[in-house]
Image (cartoon, rainbow, N blue to C red):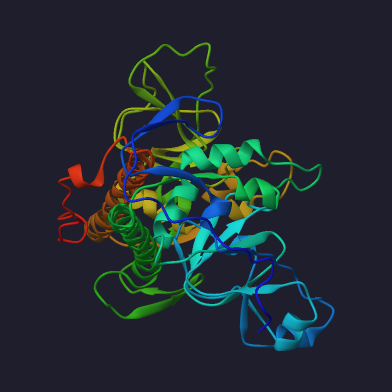
Amino acid sequence: MSEVREQHQGGDLMSASMTRAKIPEGGHSGPTVELPERWQMETLGKIAAGFVSGGTPSTKNNEFWKGNIPWITSKWLNFKLHLESGEKFISEDALKQSTTTVVPKNNLIFATRVGVGKVAVNNLDLAINQDLAGVLVHSDCHDIRFLAYQLRSDRIQRTVVSQKRGATIQGITRDALKELEIYLPPLAEQRKIAGVLCLVQQAIEQQEKLIALTTELKKTLLHKLFTEGLHGEPQKQTDIGPMPESWNVKRLDDFCILQRGFDITKKEQIPGNIPVVSSGGIASYHNIAKVKGPGVVVGRKGTLGTVHYVDMDYWPHDTTLWVKDFKGHDPLFTSYFLKTLRFERYNSGASNPTLNRNTVHAELVAYPKPKEQVEIGRILRTVENKGRLHERKHVALTALFHTMLHQLMTAQVRVDDLDLYTANLTGNRVV
């Protein structure tokens, strides 16, 4: 691997103690931040032991892209703090014959052009492209996670945005990167702050995994329940494929009747608690209902084919079709059932496609008896509610993370003053 380029010696270590200092937040202008004793402000250029530039090997040489050296672009940087793998892999010759450079593991990678402001810690040696810079840090002087989190803070990101230059692709210069002002507590406090933020971030990532798993479970259940049913009964051959023996195979209008919604302008609406449901979902609220709930609405124009279940009285907008007659079938089951029919396939690509109820009424469909419908609807609703719970937790944890990031990095809240437990996250005390 090639040598690190553009290295320079870092600045002095922070002193054991210092008096309180008032520092402009985000640079030489803006509101003043009063830093506690033993905190100091230093530029990234003085903290860093060196900086590394990147590049892209020629894409015309296929051999360059058949190696085992991990290489990344700024697209590879996301919410996760640590980089564990490469985006692509390049050869030793690619490294030698291009401007890309390997950033040794346990340093910072900062996006200076495309995706400017993104930052992460590389857990492995990584070659980088021209949109990235490697920031080399002495881990015995500074906590690398703390520095990465501070570079992600709103204060730093606002400064980065203000420093962007360029006509086509905007980015920040190496000099601007070096001048970013970092607030530095003692190393022990850096580690505690990073530890707290890491735990909250891990909880966020866990909710993301649970949301993905729940989404996949719902997708799998939809397919299985609407092709095999609940009771594992023998299958019969039908015009639309094999179906459970007890299921009916009829036209859609034998199962339910769809009706075009009712036009109403924003100006005609009077504030109330009745949802006005358009093709994209609840668009607004009115004081008069057109239809008794529960109901099912399908996108007719705009967001074609989307299905919405409404558990209260509502107003179906003109951009939708609504179920006028369930014909004795379960409304909740009907909402999931109509989703499996994939009405969006009728989108012809026209500038304003519409869903014709006469066309979909003629479709052959298969469906179970009402008792099984209720059971299927209950199962799918349980999974859906679980997914919504994880989504709410994700929103709450994300808000907590951003609040803590700002307050801990500006010393508005001191980590030693926190009595923070993560019983709802990991079951362990944080600090």
Q: Say which quadrant the N terminus sits in.
A: bottom right
Vertical comparison of 23 with 360: above or below: above
Give the left or right position of residue 61, taking residue 155 as reference: right
Residue 329 visible in the shown view: no
Image quadrant holding the C terminus, namely: bottom left
From the viewer's perspective, tell me whether residue 188 is left or right of residue 76.
Answer: left
Identify the residue at image location x=58%, y=49%.
117
The quadrant in which residue 228 appears is bottom left
- Residue 380 pos. (x, y %): 29, 57
Can residue 165 be seen from the camera position used here?
yes
Residue nearest the viewer, comparing 86 with 212: 86
Q: Is residue 205 positioned above or below 170 on the image?
A: below
Q: Residue at x 41, y 52 (%)?
A: 14
Residue reaching furthest right? Answer: 60
Dividing the picture into quadrants, the one containing residue 379 is bottom left
In this view, 166 is above or below 422: above
Left/right placement of residue 18 relative to residue 356 reads left
Q: Is residue 40 left or right of residue 64?
A: left
Residue 56, image x and y in percent?
Answer: 75, 70
Picture coordinates of residue 75 (x, y %)? 61, 61
- Counting labels gives 0
Image position, residue 91 (x, y; %): 70, 86
Which one is nearer the viewer's eye here, 143 or 218?
Answer: 143
Q: Quadrant of residue 18?
A: top left
